[in-house]
Amino acid sequence: MSTDPKRDSLQFFAMEATYAMIQNQINAREVKMIRVADAAVFPGDGKVNILSDGNMQALKGATIIANRRDKRYRIYNASVNVKSRKDYSASGYYDYIDEDGDIQPIYFDPVVVDSSNNTYGVSAVSNPDGFALNSHFKFTGGIELHAERPQLTFDGGYRLTSECIGTEGPWVAFRSEVNPTDVRLPVLPMMKDTLGNPLLAAIVYSDFFGSVYPALFEKPQAFGDTLVASASGNIRYNKALGAYMIGSDDRINGKTRAGNLMTLDTKQCILTGEGAVELGAGLGQVKMETFGKAIHYTVVDSSSFRLAMALDFLFSDQAMGRMREALQLANLKGVDVNSDIYFSMLNNLVGTSTANDLLNDLNTTGQVKRLPAQLIKTLTLTDLTMRWDPDLKSYISTGPFGVAGIQKDLINRQVDGYVEIGKRRTGDILNIYIETGPNEWYYFTYGNGIMQAISSNNEFNNILAGIKEDKRTIKGKSDEESYQYIISTPERRIAFLRKMQSVAPENN
């Protein structure tokens, strides 16, 4: 035991020791362990020499266990300077072992004691190709060892190793602890690379280029681009699926379907976004919410969508009632209320718990006792299969889709028809054509503040024609577009059908 106050009663046990009077030093042998701060230091050869000035000679080839209570970190081949009972400095190696059992030694220099009496070490990645967190993520930057924390802290940038997005992309800036056997890295809503540039994790629509493109940890192509589908939380590689997944931990683990999820299938290079989908359409007083899946096929550079759509706009209750009655009386196939798309709509509008209750009612009785206010929309569509048409600059539907609800009633009937959401520099447009039977149809078209509608049902048309202007008009405020609905013309419907049939002949 040292009696020097500076050593703070530093002590250790030795099986054998000699005192060299000429050199005025103590040579101890078979020293098993030295307790210092939170660590246990094991001399490599069991020898400890106390020099004439009272300092302990640096230990070579030593092993440090930090801390003694949890024994989380083993630093080996260490050079250690023990200064007192509560202070030491060192350098040495720690083995990072990933989920596959691959070992990478990390050299920490220095290793010191922090103000809380805990061992703390720092390391810097010098390899220009980065440090492998596992076979799916590379890292560059600094690595910190905090003995009181269960995992190492990584402060720098990460990069995916998939060829689907290129291996020389930006380094995503982050700071967090990383579990080597279950690597999950943070994905923030507002991300930057290590140079401070903004990054996206999304499928994106660019007004400037008139295109939909994938941006998985890439810069936006132009200012004001719309995030069609995105997710935040953590990113993890799922071996079973061969895919990177971004979302909350519960979403990634499959414990919930709530929240957004992004998936990159590395076998086919397909990027999929699930949850809330934003098509970026500016429709003024027509409020549109879309939910479901956005899919981008990287190899062929094309996008498709599986969507539910909730539309709220001023319209005649009586006219919508005629359409509702026609759908309810028609011999139409029912909608699959258990589909992912239908659940995504319910979940985003009313929350997971209420969504599950509604589905339980629909599956047991075929109806709900009371429709939540969030689901009361002018028109709700589901099971829409859509694609981006770069020539039309429009999202267009293909195949049948479902009418989920009209105002306060769930309909859940599958219909033939078309939906178009067009991006225009003069103002975005919306077209909806619904067939309720071989000879009965309803057509809505919106653009520049005017909603037009017409039907094969003369009662529907007569109701619209008889409504006074002030009852079908919303005067916009200074920063809002005005709105009015009017009866349309047969020619508009015919022109729209010709356009859809020309670009989607498979629907004929």
Image (tube, helix red, strand yellow):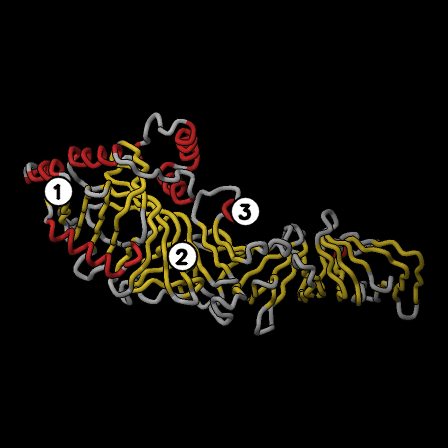
Closer to the chain start, of discs 2 and 1, is 2
Q: Nearer the viewer, residue 496 or 245?
A: 496
Position of 213 with respect to 407 (left or right) is: right
Counting other residues with Cα less than 10 Å from the Cα at mark 1, is it few (<14), some (14-19), or many (20 or more)? Answer: some
Residue located beneath label 2 in the image: 295
Tag 2, which secondary structure?
strand
Q: Name the residue at the top extreme.
A: 369
Q: Is residue 256 left or right of residue 327?
A: right
Front residue of 86/419: it is: 419
Q: Position of residue 66 (x, y in %)?
A: 72, 54
Q: In percent of the image, x 60 and y 73: which residue is there? A: 127
Q: Amino acid at mark 2?
A: Ile
Which quadrant of the view contains residue 325? top left
Query: Badges 2 and 1: C-beta atoms under 8 Å apart?
Result: no
In the depicted view, which residue is nearer to us: 40 or 302? Answer: 302
Q: Which residue is mark 1?
A: 474
Query: x, y (%) of residue 335?
Result: 36, 39
Q: Residue furthest bottom?
A: 128
Amino acid type for the residue under numbered disc 3: Asn
Describe the element under mark 1 as helix, strand or loop: strand
Of all residues, the one furthest to the front in this rendering is 438
Label 2 neighbour load within 10 Å: few <14, some 14-19, many 20+: many
Q: CA distance from mark 1 to mark 3?
A: 46 Å
Circle 3 crowding by C-alpha within 10 Å: few under 14, some 14–19, many from 20: few
- Badge 1 amino acid: Ile
Q: Residue drawn at (29%, 56%), measured in percent from left and top? A: 395
Q: Nearer the viewer, mark 2 or mark 1?
A: 2
The quadrant of the image that shows the C terminus is bottom left
